[in-house]
Structures are given as structure tokens and as C-alpha cells.
Image (cartoon, rainbow, N blue to C red):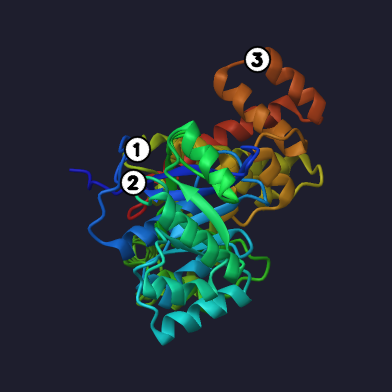
Amino acid sequence: MTKKRDPLYDKIFFARQPILMPDQSLWGYELLFRNSSEATTAIISDSYKATLNIAADLCAAPGENIPKNVKLFVNFSHKSILDKIPYSLPAGKTVVQLPETTPPTPNLIKALEELSKDGYSIAIDDFEGRPQGEFLIAYADAVIVDFLCADEAKIQKICALCKEYNAKLIAKRVENMSQFTMAQKMGFNFFQGFYFKRPENIKGRKLRSGEIVKLKILKLIESPVPDFEELAQALQNDVSISYRLLTLLNSPTFGFSQKINSIKQAIVLAGWKMLKNWLRVILLTDLTPKEKSLELPQLATQRAKFLQLITIESQKGLQPDAMFILGLFSLLGAMFDMPMTKLTEYLPLDDDISAALCGEDNIYMKYLKLVGFFEEGDWENLESVIDELGLNPVTVSKSYYDSAQWANSFFQIPGSA
């Protein structure tokens, strides 16, 4: 029975609601924790964990890039500020939002001063002018006032206090035209609420930390000058790969006269070229999500060998190892249902190879088209691209056959499945 594996990615859930300027142009987004992509409110049992989720998910959020001048408001708990969680988000863009009820302890004040010095903005949420709020406002760039909960007299008092400390005023939960008009007359600088737009749920995927470690191992093995000491240490931290490597090298397939007992010994005896190719395939297979067919990594492996063989035979000035990588990673998008632009951030790739994988037209893209035409049986286009690349059709056909044989045998090696 095949062991069930965790998927490569975790799901992302958070919401964002715009904060607008008086002309209703975008000034910032408040980021709101959500338990699911369909949730319309937050169910928070642990505010610290909710903050961590928001920070992690924001860094992996899909979709359009947010303009540099747009602020990102994230609610931080007392503990998360002391633990320096705000530093996981970009300075100059991030507004550290904390409730007025946060205890203004000496350590918190010191942390807020450091954040301000490092380029972060501070905003006090649900500000009503409580004693601790009047203490915190000295360290704040803005205060956020709930227009559904505060009466006009209280808001006037808040406005006077903010003017004294030169703090910006943000009106939240503005739900109708009269509230918007009142907030403008009272000197508020920014506005948020259902009157403008409801929170928009953002969903997507992010790579799991364990899988990012595997991608880092890929980076180690692709280094022009491999650090065998660092590689051995990294492999030792992955029990599954270590076990399979030792099982493989102790099998009759290799027939070493001495038993291999350590990862360092395995690296030396296996030979760098063989070991690098084996690790490439194993890591790619491990990274394939459980709902995806394992035929995908096998096909990617065949592509890698095919392009490597063509490069060796044709001697067109391309590097065989680079072509192997091009083929090996060419199906990552299909494997993970993630855009290649996101995946290539984690991979040790030459800029031109990365560009080809992301769909840009260059010499490497032409070789990817060659592979695709061969697999689809599109003989007319295949012949055209073979001519364009100046390749020998017989060499191409033989390389494809040999790569299929090699990939099949590779996946049948004991310990590699």
C-alpha cells in the first residue's frame, strides 16, 4: 500500500479591506485573519497564532503585486510585537496595528520605538482615549476610530488629542454617506468600511517549510563548487533520503566491495555525477503532491536526460547539466498547480533558464518546445524546430529513446521509489 504523503503546499486564507484617502483612492489594506476561503468573519482562539498566519500568508500571497506606496495594516498582539514578528514583513510598507487595550509595558514601548526607528508605522486600533491609549498615542503614527461605536462628542475629543500628538486619523466601519461626510468634516485623513468595500477574501497556496528545505538541498547540489560537508549535513537531516541513499548504494546494482555506513562515505564512493542526478530525481519525486501522478516526475526525468543527451551530441555550446535541470523542472507548474514564477523563487536557476520555464521566448524555450512536440507527436512542428536548432533528426530520435530507457531504469532502482 502506498504511503499517503502530505501535499507540497498549505492553503492560504486571509482577507483584505481597503483603506481610502478622501478622494477614495487606495491608501492601504487592512489584512484580516480568516479560517477558510469562504469565511466572512474571523474565529480567533489564539491571537498570536492568527498574527503568525497573516504574516506567513501575506509573504506567499498570490496575484497582483501591491504598489509600493500602499500600506499594509496587520493587527499584532503584545506577545507578537515583543517576539519581533513585524520584522517578517517589509519596513516602510507595514503598519503595526495594536489594540488600545494593549498593556503599555516598558518592553512594549521599547519595541515600538525600535519599530519606528526601523521604518515601520504604528497605529492604535479601536481608539477611545482610554488611559493606556493616551499613553500609547505618543508612539503612534495614526489612530483608528470605530464610527459605529463612538458618539460625536467622543470623536471630537479624540480628534483634539490626535492633533496634539500629530497623529493621523483613520475612520473605520464607515457604513453610509452621512458617516463619511461627518468623518471628513471632523478632519479624518483616511476611511474604511462597508460604504466603500467589504473585506475581500484572498486564497491560494504556499510552500511548506519542509518542502522548502528539499528545494534548498537542490540548491546545494547545483552549486558550481559543491560543499560536500554542508551537503552531507543537509542530507543527514532528511531521514527518508538518507535511508534510500544508503539502501541504493549497498544494493547489488552498484556492487561496492565495502559496506557504506555514512552519508559522507556515500558521497565519496558514489561519485558526484551519479549522486547529483539521483538526488535531483529523488527530491523531485518527494516534492510531488500526493494527488498528482508519479508519472509526472518520471516524465520530467526523461525530459532532463533527453535534453542532456541532445546537448552532448549536438555540441551547440549549451551546458549538458543546465539542460538536464531545464527538463527536470519543466513540469513543476503542472505538479504543484502553482505558477512557475512563484516556484522559481526557490530554485537555483540561471536567469535564462528561469525565464524559459516562466514562458519567455529564448533558446531554452525552443528546446522545451522540441520536447513538447515530440511528446505530442506533432511531427510537423517537431521537424521545424529541429531544423531551427540545427539538430540531427536521427540523433534527436535516438536521444529520446535512450532517455526513456534511462528514466525507466532509474525509477526501478531499489530504494528510489
What number is the disc on residue 37?
Answer: 1
* Above-or-below relation of 364 to 147: above
Q: Position of residue 150 (x, y in %)?
A: 38, 52
Q: Position of residue 305 (x, y in %)?
A: 58, 43
In the picture of the structure, the residue carrying the numbered disc 3 is: 379
Residue lying at the far front of the rendered structure: 153
Q: Position of residue 286 (x, y in %)?
A: 38, 51
Q: Residue at x 52, y 67 (%)?
A: 161
Q: Secondary structure at mark 1?
A: loop
Q: Amino acid at mark 1?
A: Ser
For the N terminus, the image quarter is top left
- How crowded is the residue under tag 2: few (<14 C-alpha within 10 Å), some, or many (20+)? many
* Residue 381 in sight here: yes
Q: Nearer the viewer, residue 167 or 224?
A: 167
- Asked whether, in this view, residue 112 is left or right of residue 48, the answer is right
Q: Residue at x 54, y 38 (%)?
A: 181
Q: Secondary structure at mark 2?
A: loop
CB under 8 Å between callouts 2 and 1? yes
Give the foreground label among 1 and 3.
1
- Asked whether, in this view, residue 205 is left or right of residue 141, the answer is left
* Above-or-below relation of 228 to 221: below
In the picture of the structure, the residue carrying the numbered disc 2 is: 34
Q: Secondary structure at mark 3?
A: helix
Q: Earlier in the sequence, mark 1 or mark 3?
A: 1
Give the image quarter of residue 46.
bottom left
Give the foreground label among 3 and 2.
2
